[in-house]
Amino acid sequence: MSTTPAESISSIACIACGQQKHVTHFDAVFDYISTETFAIDRCENCGLMVTRPMPDDQNIGRYYPPRYRGNRHGFTGTTRTNLRRFAVEKCFKPGFKGRLLDIGCGNGTFALAMKNAGWTVCATEIDEPTVQSLNERGITTKTPWDAMRDGFGQPFDAITCWHVMEHVLEPTKVSQWAASMLNPNGVFQATVPNADCLQARFFGNQWLHLDVPRHRFHFTPSTFEKVLTDSGLSVIKRSVFAWEYDWFGIIQSALNPLCSKPNMLFDQLTGAPDKHTMSAKDKALSFGVGSLIAGASFVPMVIAAIFGDGATLTYTCQAK
């Protein structure tokens, strides 16, 4: 199935600035999972980008099949979990163990790690089997709709939202809710891809982290910060780099126009259960040429991050 959205959307107000003038940024971005094609429109006023057509919450589930829910972090999973734990705990005094909410917890790896580290952990996730599994393992977990309706009884010292805001239908509503759930001096940490970074501009509609239509919004630093601050949050720290997201974004994006299908190396490394079958040519390109790209891109990636042009935005906030 192929979907061809309208060339411009002018009747929908931008969630960041409220203006109603959008222009086509990319007219054809291929989804490697559904094989559908989507457009990305950009607000002419502030630059926030949106996927069109944007699936609503009743239809988005079909874009998250088992392939998507494989071991998405692959061999970097343990490192990423440890880095996220460090990012949270350095916001508090040494040895502090409080209440943490992980919004959009994925397979629950980070939530379980924080529970094992002594935190009292709750979570939200749209995948019902994950909700059930984590509840059975001692983490109070709800769907986001149930959580926003019923809450969790007590506020939180830390709320994490790792690579979630780009997925949700109403990012401002999520950040407003998070702000309302924080203890005094509690922290909210959120991470999204940086749609205005050098690699995003260079690779265009082949950029790995566009990931339409699961990524409904595509934030720049200024638009992401505005959504957060307009939601009652005050930004206290910013980061523009996460080594595995930034590095692999370059590698896979460079391979996408070369291989017979996009994201083939990603499928292989993350152990997707219904991953693509790779031809000999695709294997040579993905693992051979991919290794060369990895070596050649490491230093430029680090330099870009040093100059504030990394591919991953992480903002730490407190309620105003």
Image (cartoon, helix red, strand yellow):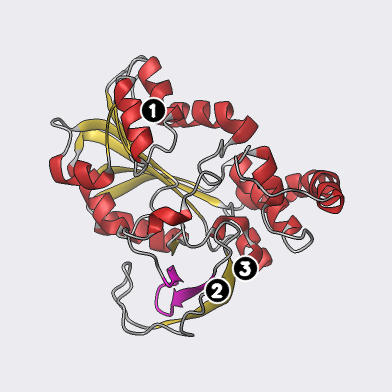
Q: Nearer the viewer, residue 290 or 283?
A: 283
Tell me, yes or no, whether the highlighted magenta stretch contains residue 77.
no
Report helix, strand or loop for mark 1: helix
Quarter location, residue 222: bottom left
Q: Position of residue 64 (x, y in %)?
A: 46, 50
Question: N-terminal of the two: label 1 or label 2?
Answer: 2
What predominant SS class does the magenta segment belong to? Answer: strand
What residue is at 39 percent from the left and 16 percent from the top?
116
Cα distance in 3D space between marks 3 and 2: 16 Å
Give the residues in magenta.
Answer: 37-53
Q: Is disc 3 surrounded by few (<14), some (14 to 19) or many (20+) residues within 10 Å?
A: many
Q: Residue at x 38, y 52 (%)?
A: 165
Label 2 sits on residue: 2
Of 61 and 80, the residue lying toward us? 61
Residue to which mark 3 is pinned: 205
Q: Position of residue 314 (x, y in %)?
A: 45, 45
Answer above or below: position of 20 versus 207.
Answer: below
Under mark 3, the amino acid is: Asn
Badge 1 crowding class, 10 Å Cα cut-off, few under 14, some 14 to 19, many 20 or more, is many
Q: Is residue 273 left or right of residue 216?
A: right
Residue at mark 1: 111
Upstream in sequence: badge 3 or badge 1: 1
Is there a contact, CB below 8 Å, between mark 1 and mark 2? no
In the image, residue 170 above or below residue 88: below
